[in-house]
Amino acid sequence: MEIKDIVLKQKEFFESGKTLEYKTRKSYLLRLREAIIEFQPKLYQAIYADLGKSETEAFMCEIGLALNDLKYQIKHLKKNMKKRNKKTPLAQFKGKSWVQPSPYGNTLVISPWNYPILLAIEPFVGAIAAGNTVILKPSEFSVETSKVLAELIQKVFPEEYATVVLGDATVSASILENEFDYIFFTGGTKIGQKVAMAASKYLTPVTLELGGKSPVIVDSSAKINLSAKRIVFGKFLNAGQTCVAPDYVIVHEAVKSEFINAMKSWIQKLYPNALENASYVKMINERHFKRVVHYMEETTILYGGKSSAETLKIEPTLLECNEDSLVMQEEIFGPVLPILTYRTTEELLSIIRKHPNPLALYIFSTKKKAINTILSRIQFGGGCVNDTIIHLATNELPFGGVRQSGMGNYHGKRSFETFSHYKSILSKANWLDLPIRYTPYTSKKKKLIQFFMK
């Protein structure tokens, strides 16, 4: 079936009102959760084929989080669907005010390859919970996982309700030629700009989950050993192919040597013999492998640096570079970590502001004043104090970027809200009609209006 026909079919299905009922939404969310559990073996095989991701990491960072999000949406669905009463001003006596969540309609979710299960399922679930129809376009780079997702969604949903469209960038471009009521995109900034331009043709609202260079700050008061351990975890998880992975470290020069030694020690403990380690993730394809290897060619390698073109693996690598190095000009999205140093707070802020609006920011410090200075003076999407990336793991914290790292957010309740338009309603009594708002306006009416509206 042609894409335009699928879009029209879903439009008709949505307009029938069949996605609106609580029982319908809940039943499909429950069936989706059951299907993900049933498909786990296939999903493990597929994601290992695409990224070399172990079952433990796949469950911890993808399947488990997707199941947890489904559990959250099912538990809170009835409450989220309810209208929310608001105060009505005395001037509108006798009236009642509320906001009422309403699905947008036909939605498009475009997901990336780096977390091909989680970043497809989580926005998909938000769209279904909110009462929309969905077309899911997963990445063509995570070929095997995308195929399994298509099979999984097809088993649970009729095509007119939700479906998966496979294909390369030309297919994505073809999909974007159609009119949608909401578009949710996760990926790189350049493609995000194209999505936003396509959406602007129809004035379609969008959520863009992009990326950027997410900094890690290690000041002189930080607990160095623990900081290094948590940075190694956050950076080299999924071989650095994480949108909120630490992109570079700025360490105070007083603790630089101690920090680098601690980083080396934890890499050795957590990723021994990385190139032969079955639990260590590979690069998604040859193009990205070559791109990341090239970053190492014009810098000083402090640790690591080895790679295998045959397996597409690059071992965890620490780099010493300056702000003009190629590796500091774009998001790395790989297992190499540049380390810069600073002396003063203003120098630190200057470095970060050269890479504005990161998706995440991490600061390791025991000084409240230093922490508050960074959190208040730098614009970024979200982050952690004395840890990395775990702010993504809670449904209670909205996740999203700002300006160049994206617009809009989701997770937990915010996923439902993102895919909902909140209609503002004021209902007036039909047995009372105060005459003061109607002409002719007398001095008495003027005084009454001023009284009520002060």
Image (cartoon, rainbow, N blue to C red):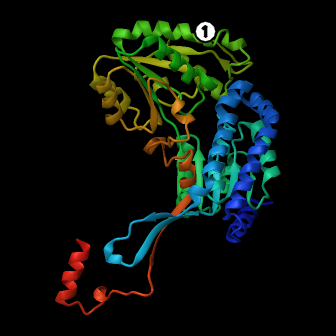
Q: Residue at x 79, y 44 (%)?
A: 35
**Can you see residue 166?**
no
Q: Which residue is mark 1?
A: 269
Specify the quadrant of the image occupied by residue 272: top right
Q: Residue furthest bottom?
A: 440
Residue at 43 percent of width and 12 percent of height: 224
Camera-nearest residue between 287 and 66: 66
In the rendered view, would you say 267 is above or below 442? above
Picture quadrant where residue 280 is located: top right
Left/right of residue 151 with respect to residue 355 in the rendered view: right
- For the question of whether residue 5 can be seen, the reply is yes
- Compare residues 445 and 357 and report the one nearer the observer: 445
Residue 273's place in the image compared with 284, above or below, is above
Instruction: Provide residue 255's location: percent of width, then percent of height.
Output: 37, 10
Mark 1 neighbour density, 10 Å: few (under 14) some (14–19) many (20 or more):
few
Question: In terms of image quadrants, where is residue 79?
Answer: bottom right
Tell me what residue is drawn at x 34 percent, y 71 percent: 89
Check the picture and name the quadrant holding the N terminus.
bottom right
Residue 88 position in % (x across, y down): 38, 70
Q: Nearer the viewer, residue 372 or 276?
A: 372
Q: Secondary structure at mark 1?
A: helix
Three-letter amino acid code of the residue under disc 1? Lys
Q: What is the residue that sits farthest to the left in this orientation?
A: 443
Classify residue 57 as left or right of residue 453: right
Residue 374 percent location from the top left of the image: 34, 30
Instruction: Decide: is 393 above or below 131.
Output: above
Name the spot of residue 327 as percent of width and height, x first.
Answer: 49, 24
- Image quadrant for the C terminus? bottom left
